[in-house]
Amino acid sequence: MKNIRIKIIITFCSAIAISVVVIIAINYYINSKSAKYIYQEMANVPQIKVALVLGAKVNQNGTLSPIYQDRVQTAFELYESKKVEKIIVSGDHGRENYDEVNSAKDYLLERGMESEDIFLDYAGFDTYDSLYRAKEIFQVSSLVVVTQNFHLSRAVYIGKSLGLETYGMSADKHQYIDNGYSELREKFSKIKAFFDVNLNSKPKFLGENISIEGDGRESWDEKYIPEVFEKNEIDNEVSDDISETNEDENADGFVEEKEITIEDVEIEKNLKAEFLVEEESIQETKTKNILLEVPFAAQAPFGNWSDARKQDGCEEVAAIMAMAWVRGEGLMLQEVDDRINEISAFEEKEIGTFHDASADDVVEIIFKKYFEYNQVEVKYDIDKEDIKAELYSGNLIIVPTDGQLLNNPNYTPPGPTTHNLVAIGYDFDSKEFITNDSGTRNGKQYRYDEDVLERALLDYPTGFHENLEEIRTAMIVVRK
C-alpha cells in the first residue's frame, strides 16, 4: 500500500513537472517567434493599411477601461500619423447590455476619425477569433495589432500562423492595476493559442465578407445616414416651382440644365425638418442640468494642512480626481495622500517647486508627463459660458481661481489666493456651477453661483505665490 502511494505521488509530481516544462517551452517558442515584429515606438512601425484593436473591458456607463482606452487611443494615433488607413475594432458585443466595439467606435469618432475608416467586428470574443475574422471576414492580408505588451507576442504569433503579415504595436501608456494577474493568465492563454493554431480551430462565428477596401459603416449594426447637405445648404429656401432648373457648369465650361424633381424637393424638405429638430434638441440639452460622476478628495486627506504639499496641493488633487473620472476608478484616502506626495516630488524635479502650478504646467507636467495622459488642453481668456459649453459636451473642467473671491465659508479666512476647482456640473435652474472643491472636506459637489465663480477666475504663475504679471482667465479641459 505504501509503495502504491509513493508511485501515485511520483506520477503526480512528474505530471506537474512535465506540464511546467511544456508551458515554459511553448511560451518561449511564441515569444521568440514574435519578438522582432513588435514595436514600442510608433515611428518604427511600417506603413500598413489596417490596425486591429483587440477588445477589453468597458465600464457599466459605456466608458472604456484604462487598458482598452490605451489600445484605442494608440490605434487612433497610428491613423492620425498616417501609419494606417483603416481601423478594425474587434471585441465582445454578444450581450445587449455589454458593447466593447461601439464604445470604441464612439471614442474614435469623438476624436475626429473618418467614420468610413472604422470597421467593427462584433464577434471578436478572443484573440484567435479576432485575427481569424480579420483575415476571412474583412479580407485583410496584413495588419498591425494594437494591444499591451503582455498580450502582443501571442497576438502576433496567431496572426503570422494564420498567414497574415502581422506586426504588433505596444499600447502601454500607463501602469495597470492588474498587470501581474494579466501576465500570469497570458502564460496559459499562449497554450490555448498554440493548440488553436495547430488544430486549425474555427471561430465561434463567421458570416458574410466585408471588404476592408469598402466603407466601414457597412460593418456597423446601425445604418448610417449620409450627410448630403451642410447646414447652409439646408437653410436655403426650397423653391415652390418644382420645374425650376438648376445650372451646373460642366468640365468644358458649358452650362448644363438639371431638372429638380418632386423627389428632390421632398428629400430636401425632409432633411431641413430633421436639421431643425436636431437644432431644437441641442438647445433643449443646453437648458438641462448636468452632473458628471467624479470621485471627490480633499487636498489634505487626513487633515494634515501643516504639510506644505497638502496646503498647496489643489492642482495635484484636481488632476487626481480628473484621472479617477477618466479611468472610472474610485479614490481611497491613503492612495490620494501618497499620490499627492509623489506628484509633488515629481514637480520639484521637473520645475523646482510644488507650491503653485500654472494651468499650462498642470497640463504639461502633471497630466502629460506624470500621468502620461494627453486628452487634455488649456483654453485661455474664458468666461462662464465657455465652462458651460465644455460641461455640456461631457468634458470635465479644472479652473484656476483667486480663492479669496469665492467667499467659501469653509475656508480658513481670508482663503487661498491661488486655488484650483474641479467643475463637474451645472444647475440651470439655480444658475450654479457644481464643483469638487478640494480646499475643504465639505467640498464634494460644492455649489458656486455662476457669477461668483466667473469673477474669481484667474490663472496664476508657477512658483511660490509669485506676483501676477498678467491678468488672464483659463480652464483645463479634460476629455475621456
Image (cartoon, rainbow, N blue to C red):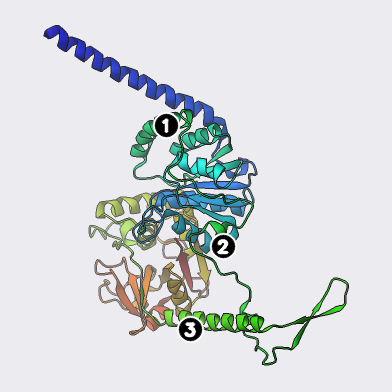
CA gap between label 2 and label 1 equals: 36 Å
Q: Earlier in the sequence, mark 3 or mark 2?
A: 2
The residue identified by callout 3 is 280
Q: Nearer the viewer, mark 3 or mark 2?
A: 3
Q: Residue furthest bottom?
A: 240
> Residue 469 placed where, x, y %?
52, 70
Instruction: Tell me which amino acid carries mark 1.
Output: Lys
> Residue 87 placed where, x, y %?
56, 51
CA gap between label 3 and label 1 equals: 54 Å
Residue that appears at 48% across and 54% down: 368
Q: Quadrant of the N terminus?
A: top left
Apparent side of residue 459 relative to residue 421 in the rendered image (left or right)? right
Vertical arrangement, residue 198 with respect to residue 251, above or below: above
Q: Quadrant of the C terminus?
A: bottom left
The residue identified by callout 2 is 112
Instruction: Tell me which amino acid carries mark 3.
Output: Glu
- On residue 278, the disc is none
The residue identified by callout 1 is 190
Q: Earlier in the sequence, mark 2 or mark 1?
A: 2
Q: Residue furthest top?
A: 3
Vertical arrangement, residue 480 with respect to residue 254, above or below: above
Q: Earlier in the sequence, mark 3 or mark 1?
A: 1
Q: Residues within 10 Å of mark 1 (few under 14, many from 20)?
A: many
CA gap between label 3 and label 2 equals: 24 Å
Vertical arrangement, residue 58 with respect to residue 290, above or below: above
